[in-house]
Image (spheres, coloured by chain):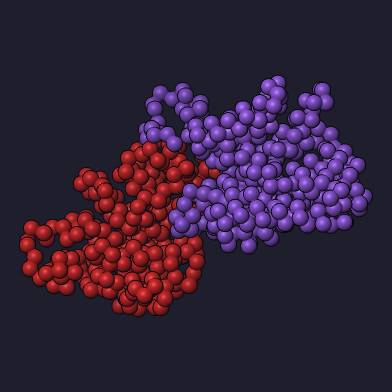
Chain colours: A purple, B red
């Protein structure tokens, strides 16, 4: 495999895990615009544990993932006191605080960043992405996943159905934090270098776009969104500097044509073999979103 | 009365700002009864439902479900304690399918971590799904269980909401205008269905404007006006009650042809 191809594949897998980290909270109705902060925690966590503390990768990556999960758990309590656009701002602020903290911490190399000597190869990254994808599909199939989706639709009605709203939201933030952290840890060991400037708000916006453009209704959404966002800019390289324009137009078109994301439940329903080969057209599946 | 009532509302008050929306309301719903809660628009019927189900906290008084105080419980514990409700405007989850909406109604029955992490969507033969499909059939909901709820006719969605509320096996089922927007045939079907569900001890409290529906279904009626209870007695006598007539029509002289439909 060429270096270019394997590098692109690694970015795709890391982006996919990162996108699932944001998707898990989005599926439960919460927008997390602090993704880069969680990813930075995972990246710096493993960087410090492996480069400074000399621990093996097999320990530092899971440990960094758990640290990000713990931070996700803790930060969910103040964040969940806010709603709507204020929640977006609160998570955004969290991301900025993490980046600012890292930039001013000599332990983490400050603005110089950290070199991460321990390298991990592509197969390990692919396996991680597959595991996270399967875990997310599994989660969305469970009753907990059903409760999460119900919160996204109508929180008040979900309360009256007996759903423990706060517990479900905290769980979503914790799992989301873990996935973002894992993506950061893999990034650190794959690129051998971390710097706080990389984990900026633009990164948080991009990963949120992966999810929103791909579709936050099903676990297929982030998969399609990550593919779209990772591969389209690469394909557009042929077109030179015009690619940014084309890419931007493509995003706008997606938002206009598929406001709920590329993959919706409705699309999956129509594409399901049951529906395609069913003699009796399902009653009441008429109006589409 | 020696029997513990299914629902006992005792001296409950609620103010929004300076406005007393519910003012010292007391009544009891006997176990197994089907009671109607009626009143003119803005009388506080839905607010009272919200107070009982815990959407809003009460200011004073107390509420007991089967003799157990519930007014300080979070809403989800009230569901576990045996309370279920529907909403005035259909509040089905638009992105969930019919069967997923109904299975959401079983949420409080799945109270172990194993039940929460059970991949429902992958098990087409799980007991949960079978029970939900059976309830659909019993209620005469003849649609594809995996269809989107958003495309379904109003009457069907209304039925799904009632079935969803029944999935938690409640002791007290509170329905907020279940017959609103239904055609006469659907209304009659709903009434028959609600009478047939009656597992032992299921108590109904129904907010409704359709008086023929109320007469058909409910033996007892309470009437609210401006947040106060003005009538508590048999449904039969409600239209002859002077205070009730005044509340609805503002006059004591009532043309008899209005008697069929108070609202």
From the viewer's perspective, tell me whether residue B207 is left or right of residue A176.
left
Residue B189: image location, x then y, percent: 25, 47
Residue at the far front in the pictured view: A241
Residue B259: image location, x then y, percent: 11, 60
A57 above or below A96?
above
Residue at left offset 29%, top offset 60%: B207
Classify the position of the N terminus of chain B by image quarter.
bottom left
Residue B18: image location, x then y, percent: 36, 75
Which one is nearer the viewer's eye here, B143 or A243? A243
Which one is nearer the viewer's eye here, B150 or B31? B150
Which one is nearer the viewer's eye here, B225 or B143? B225
Q: Is residue A32 visible?
A: yes
B180 above or below A240?
below
From the viewer's perspective, tell me whether residue B43 is left or right of residue A267.
left
Numbered circles on residues, count = 0
Classify the position of the C terminus of chain B by image quarter.
bottom left
Residue at left offset 66%, top offset 26%: A242
Residue B81: image location, x then y, percent: 46, 65
Q: Is residue A62 visible?
A: no
Which one is nearer the viewer's eye here, A47 or B87? A47
Query: Quadrant of the rendered structure where residue A17 is?
Result: top right
From the viewer's perspective, tell me whether residue B225 is left or right of residue A41.
left
A136 above or below B255?
above
From the viewer's perspective, tell me whether residue B127 is left or right of residue B10.
right
Residue at left offset 61%, top offset 54%: A89
A230 above or below A111?
above
Residue at the far top in the pictured view: A238
Residue at left offset 54%, top offset 41%: A217
């Amino acid at each position: 495999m060429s270096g270019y191809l394997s590098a692109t594949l690694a970015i795709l897998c890391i982006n996919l895990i990162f996108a699932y980290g944001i998707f898990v909270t989005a599926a439960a109705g919460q927008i997390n615009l602090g993704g880069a902060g969680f990813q930075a925690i995972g990246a710096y966590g493993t960087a410090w544990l492996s480069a400074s503390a000399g621990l093996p990768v097999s320990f530092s990556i899971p440990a960094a993932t758990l640290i990000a999960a713990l931070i996700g758990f803790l930060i969910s309590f103040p964040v969940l006191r806010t709603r709507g656009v204020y929640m977006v701002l609160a998570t955004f602020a969290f991301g900025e605080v993490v980046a600012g903290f890292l930039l001013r911490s000599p332990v983490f190399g400050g603005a110089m960043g950290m070199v991460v000597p321990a390298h991990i190869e592509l197969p390990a990254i692919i396996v991680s992405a597959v595991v996270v994808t399967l875990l997310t599909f599994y989660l969305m199939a469970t009753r907990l996943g059903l409760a999460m989706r119900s919160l996204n639709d109508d929180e008040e009605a979900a309360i009256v159905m007996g759903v423990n709203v706060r517990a479900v939201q905290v769980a979503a933030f914790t799992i989301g934090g873990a996935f973002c952290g894992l993506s950061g840890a893999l990034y650190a060991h794959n690129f051998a270098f971390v710097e706080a400037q990389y984990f900026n708000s633009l990164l948080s916006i991009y990963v949120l776009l992966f999810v929103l453009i791909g579709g936050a209704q099903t676990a297929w959404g982030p998969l399609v969104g990550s593919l779209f966002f990772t591969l389209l800019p690469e394909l557009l390289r042929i077109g030179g500097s015009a690619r940014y324009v084309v890419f931007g137009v493509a995003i706008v078109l997606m938002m206009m044509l598929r406001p709920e994301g590329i993959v919706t439940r409705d699309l999956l329903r129509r594409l399901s073999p049951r529906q395609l080969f069913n003699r009796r057209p399902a009653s009441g599946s008429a109006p589409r979103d | 009365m020696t029997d513990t009532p299914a629902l006992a509302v005792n001296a409950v008050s609620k103010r929004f700002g300076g406005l007393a929306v519910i003012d010292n309301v007391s009544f009891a719903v006997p176990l197994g009864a089907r009671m109607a809660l009626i009143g003119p628009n803005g009388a506080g019927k839905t607010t009272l439902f919200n107070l009982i189900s815990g959407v809003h906290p009460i200011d004073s008084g107390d509420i007991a479900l089967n003799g157990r105080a519930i007014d300080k419980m979070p809403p989800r514990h009230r569901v576990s304690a045996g309370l279920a409700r529907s909403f005035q405007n259909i509040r089905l989850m638009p992105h969930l399918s019919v069967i997923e909406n109904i299975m959401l109604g079983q949420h409080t029955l799945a109270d172990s971590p194993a039940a929460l992490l059970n991949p429902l969507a992958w098990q087409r033969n799980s007991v949960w799904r079978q029970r939900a499909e059976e309830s659909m059939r019993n209620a005469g909901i003849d649609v594809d269980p995996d269809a989107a709820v958003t495309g379904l006719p109003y009457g069907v969605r209304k039925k799904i909401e009632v079935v969803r509320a029944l999935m938690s096996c409640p002791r007290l089922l509170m329905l907020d205008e279940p017959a609103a927007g239904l055609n006469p045939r659907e209304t009659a079907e709903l009434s028959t269905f609600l009478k047939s569900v009656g597992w032992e001890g299921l108590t109904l409290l129904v907010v409704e404007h359709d008086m023929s529906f109320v007469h058909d279904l409910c033996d007892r009626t309470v009437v609210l006006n401006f947040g106060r209870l003005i009538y508590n007695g048999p449904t039969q006598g409600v239209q002859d009650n002077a205070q009730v007539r005044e509340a609805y029509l503002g006059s004591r002289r009532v043309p008899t042809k209005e008697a069929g439909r108070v609202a």
